[in-house]
Image (spheres, rainbow, N blue to C red):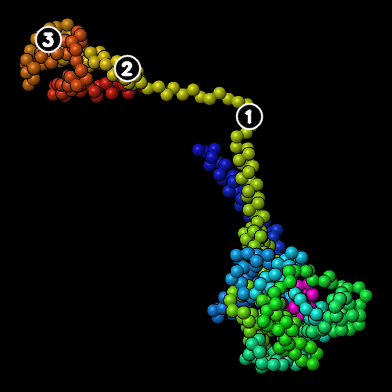
Amino acid sequence: MRQRLTIILTFVVIVGVLVIINTATYVEQEKLPDSELTPNRSTYHSGPTGARAFHDFLSESGYKVMRWREAPEKLLSKTGENVATFVVIGTTRLPFSEEQIVALHQWVANGGCFLLIDRDPSQRLLPHGHDWGIYSRLLDFPPFDIDPGDTNAMTKDVTAVKPVQPTWLTRKVESVLPSRFAGRLSVVPVPSPSPSPRSGVPGSRHGDGPRDVPDEEPPPRVVEPEESDASPAPVIHVADKNGALLVDYAYGAGRVIVLSDPYVVTNRGIRANDNLQLAINAVTAHEGLIAFDEYHQGHGATGNAFAIYFSGTPVLAIAAQVLLVVLLIVWTNARRFARPLPLAQVDRRSSLEFVASMAELQERSRAFDLAIENVYTRTRRVLARYAGVNYNSSRSEIAARIAARSKVEAHQLETLMRQCEEVINGQAVNWRQAVDLVKRLRELEKKLGLRMRARDERQAADNI
């Protein structure tokens, strides 16, 4: 016990030392401030560039909303059956693979609504099935020292943009205040066969002149969607003299909505003018579950939730060191550190084991006469001593002497002694009769106060 206590105390001391060392050496990493050059458009992010306020507002207002943490291929499975609108905000931290883009386009063609909010929408991500294209042009580029939390700096010299026509996406919207870095969308006819999407397209983000080398691959090919009753031509909802801010178009049985400024749905910009109403109209264009893409924002379900929760803290390091100590203890627990010693030989035999063994043998062999002999011999010796006669005296003499000194009748005692001696001499007896004889002998001992059992127990204790 003392050895185990030493091991436990040693383990506690080691763990305490490790905790002190990790706490003393831990330096909290300074959180980098939000930047428009490397924004975090996740709905988990509560900074100026995040969209947590918009997500929480939808959730608390009773809209069906969720954070999608799986690959877009799951939209085509049973998991994505209830998703009506899939929202991607800004340039994601993880790029879309070809297979994911094909699955997303197929989901839209099957009847889903894809909302892309980006200043420069990727041509690979936007599905196209007709002889036109949607391209973006940036009027201003964010400088290094811009503070995304400064509303005045983000909207400097910006005039509110108004809807160009009454539609579902512009209902209850009088004006929208984008940032000064918002892109402007243009719907441009693409001749067939068309060159590269960036080749010679007016109004592209890289200039108005033609380019010899495209900077982006064409979108992956998907199964041609079935024609729907909706017009395939893009519809411009919000625009100014520089271009459109909000465009949507049909694709198969579904629809694609493009908003060219993430600032409209960020934590800082959503409260300006009617930005919130426009965002609500866009995500509720199709009735049903609204899924915000968090998989490509770096919050995929494939990560370990425990590790993500404690990332950036010394808890993971402490847990790893404690696990190492436990493994060392388990590994060294059965290893010898000295010469082998023989085990101590402890005699566990009891003085009554022989008696118990003999009793079991007698019971199995039905040697009731031998059992009566063992009990009666000792009782006769005590009776002779009580009567004050020799052990070899007759039964009648012993019985008469005992009757004279006690209330025991001589005839009954002599009869009991005779029956026991007859069994010892070979008279047949069953186990019930043997038990009855032993019981009568014990009652006689108790009546005379001989206390043979107490004496036997005391002698057995002395022999141990």
Identify the residue position indicated by label 3 in the image.
Answer: 395
218 to 8, vertically: above or below: below
Could you tell me if the residues under marks 3 and 2 are in contact, i.e. CB atoms within 8 Å?
no
**Which residue type carries mark 2?**
Leu
**Quadrant in which the C terminus appears:** top left
* Residue 436 in sight here: yes
Magenta part of the chain: 114-126
The image quarter in which residue 270 lies:
bottom right
Q: Could you tell me the amino acid type at mark 3?
A: Arg
| Type of the residue with mark 1 | Ala
Given residues 229 and 295, the one toward you in this image is 229
Query: Residue 239's spot in the image, x, y percent?
Result: 75, 90
Q: Would residue 454 be found to the left or right of residue 164 on screen? A: left
Which residue is more in the foreground, 112 or 48?
112
Q: Earlier in the sequence, mark 2 or mark 1?
A: 1
Image quadrant where residue 306 sits? bottom right
Specify the label residue 338 is tagged with: 1
Cα–Cα gap, marks 2 and 1: 47 Å
Residue 260 percent location from the top left of the image: 75, 82
Residue position for label 2: 361
Q: Residues within 10 Å of mark 1 (few under 14, many from 20)?
A: few
**Dominant secondary structure, magenta:** loop
- 350 or 273, nearer to the observer: 273
Q: Secondary structure at mark 3?
A: helix
N-terminal of the pair, mark 3 or mark 2, is: 2
Q: In percent of the image, x 60 and y 65: which residue is there?
A: 79
